[in-house]
Image (cartoon, grey):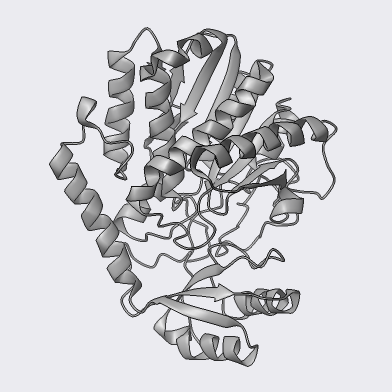
């Protein structure tokens, strides 16, 4: 059965998801999990989150070519599933239309920029980050991380004057739009909330609202579900590497793939992707001064710490657990959602070559977290815009709780 991987890019026309079904799968036993993992490989599926023993729902897109066979396999394995949409393209079109309407209505610039009710494109984000720096030079400086493979600027703001540094990395996986919304929102909050001015005297915040810029633009123009970078892989029709498997930390071991067409392709070598390399350079620039590093992802409602490459725990695991417990408690108080805390490998899955493991092992950042924002699988990567406000507020509550514990 001939199929096209989600990671393949034969042409640059927008991917048409008409007649592609969005389905939600509900594993109810560890045997179901084993079967789903087998089917993922057999049918080359892109599960939005892995099938795990926590038995949380799994969202995935089923194209018309696979539909009959994949759904039959689920039925044969007695795995309950529901069709969320018979035409995923309608969901993509609705999301895009809402974003364009909000942009037109609010003239999304400057003081009118809507951080809490609308998603934004790269150009709007870039302009707004520069606007914040230009209009608040006493608090913020625009300092790009570097350029992407396709030559675009990776925006970043340096906020505050303290000696201790907090880094907030967002949008390393391009389809995780809510993380990019958080990056913009938290930059604005740090600059405009006068109650946080004492914090800016003690800390210097480095906010990267979107690291994987090329991939993010691709989610707007071509494929809403694109995850990776956009560098070509010679000898294949596949593009991009997973920038969160590309760091020089147990590179391409468990939880990463050496297949260029895989969503977790580690790249041709450690730091083959200029985006991860530039981010590592930024971290090294502040090495010795970094109090905490937050890598923000979606989705699953998890607050995690190293290691991803091993089930073993870091020497300061108890400190990281205490800080994580403070974070999830603050999140619960914010909007009532429950997050799970723990090390990456023991909480979600093995994942080698991640940014926080590299920061911990190679840059001496001993307080590092990977945070998976809401939700648990109802909407997945397409969290409705009306949930941006509670999502960013609860995330900041968790981050602030960690900082308060460190202070």
Q: Residue at x 59, y 86 (%)?
A: 74
Q: Nearer the viewer, residue 115 or 243?
A: 115
Question: How many badges with numbers are in the image?
Answer: 0
Q: Is residue 210 visible?
A: no
Quick one: quadrant of the C terminus? top right
Rendering coords of residue 139 (x, y %): 40, 11
**Residue 256 found in image quarter:** bottom right
Given residues 321 and 157, the one toward you in this image is 321
Specify the quadrant of the image occupied by residue 112.
top left
User: Does residue 243 lie above or below 206 as drawn?
Assistant: below
Q: Residue at x 33, y 39 (%)?
A: 116
Q: Nearer the viewer, residue 48 or 351?
A: 48
Residue 294 visible in the picture? yes
Residue 1 horizontal/vertical position (percent): 51, 88
Q: Position of residue 271 (x, y in %)?
A: 61, 41
Q: On screen, 378 above or below 312?
A: below
Q: On screen, 196 above or below 20?
A: above
Task: Identify whether 113 is placed above or below 203.
Answer: below
**Residue 261, how many percent across, how many down?**
55, 65
């Amino acid at each position: 059965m001939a199929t096209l991987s989600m990671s393949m890019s034969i042409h640059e026309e927008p991917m048409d998801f008409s007649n592609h079904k969005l389905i939600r799968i509900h594993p109810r036993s560890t045997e179901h999990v084993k079967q789903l993992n087998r089917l993922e490989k057999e049918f080359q599926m892109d599960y939005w989150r892995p099938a795990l023993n926590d038995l949380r729902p799994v969202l995935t897109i089923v194209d018309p070519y696979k539909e009959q066979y994949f759904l039959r396999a689920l039925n044969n394995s007695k795995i309950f599933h529901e069709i969320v949409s018979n035409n995923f393209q309608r969901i993509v079109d609705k999301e895009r239309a809402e974003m364009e309407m909000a942009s037109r209505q609010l003239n999304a610039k400057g003081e009118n920029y809507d951080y809490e009710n609308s998603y934004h494109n790269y150009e709007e984000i870039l302009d707004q980050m520069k606007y914040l720096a230009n209009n608040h030079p006493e608090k913020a400086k625009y300092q790009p991380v570097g350029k992407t493979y396709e030559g675009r600027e990776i925006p970043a703001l340096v906020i505050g004057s303290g000696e201790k540094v907090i880094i907030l990395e967002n949008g390393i996986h391009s389809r995780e739009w809510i993380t990019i919304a958080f990056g913009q929102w938290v930059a604005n909050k740090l600059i405009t909330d006068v109650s946080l001015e004492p914090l800016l005297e003690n800390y210097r915040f480095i906010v990267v609202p979107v690291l994987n810029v090329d991939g993010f633009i691709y989610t707007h123009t071509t494929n809403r579900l694109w995850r990776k970078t956009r560098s070509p892989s010679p000898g294949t029709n596949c593009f991009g590497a997973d920038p969160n498997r590309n760091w020089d930390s147990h590179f391409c071991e468990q939880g990463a793939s050496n297949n260029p067409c895989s969503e977790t392709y580690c790249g041709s070598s450690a730091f083959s992707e200029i985006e991860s390399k530039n981010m590592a350079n930024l971290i090294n620039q502040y090495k010795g001064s970094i109090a905490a590093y937050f890598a923000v992802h979606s989705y699953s409602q998890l607050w995690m710490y190293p290691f991803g490459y091993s089930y073993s725990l870091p020497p300061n695991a108890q400190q990281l657990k205490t800080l994580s417990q403070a974070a999830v408690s603050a999140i619960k108080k914010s909007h009532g959602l429950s997050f799970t805390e723990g090390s990456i490998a023991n909480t979600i899955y093995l994942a080698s070559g991640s940014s926080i493991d590299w920061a911990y092992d190679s840059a001496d950042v001993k307080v590092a977290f990977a945070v998976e924002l809401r939700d648990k699988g109802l909407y997945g990567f397409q969290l409705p815009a009306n949930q941006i406000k509670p999502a960013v507020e609860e995330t900041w509550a968790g981050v602030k709780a960690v900082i308060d514990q460190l202070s």
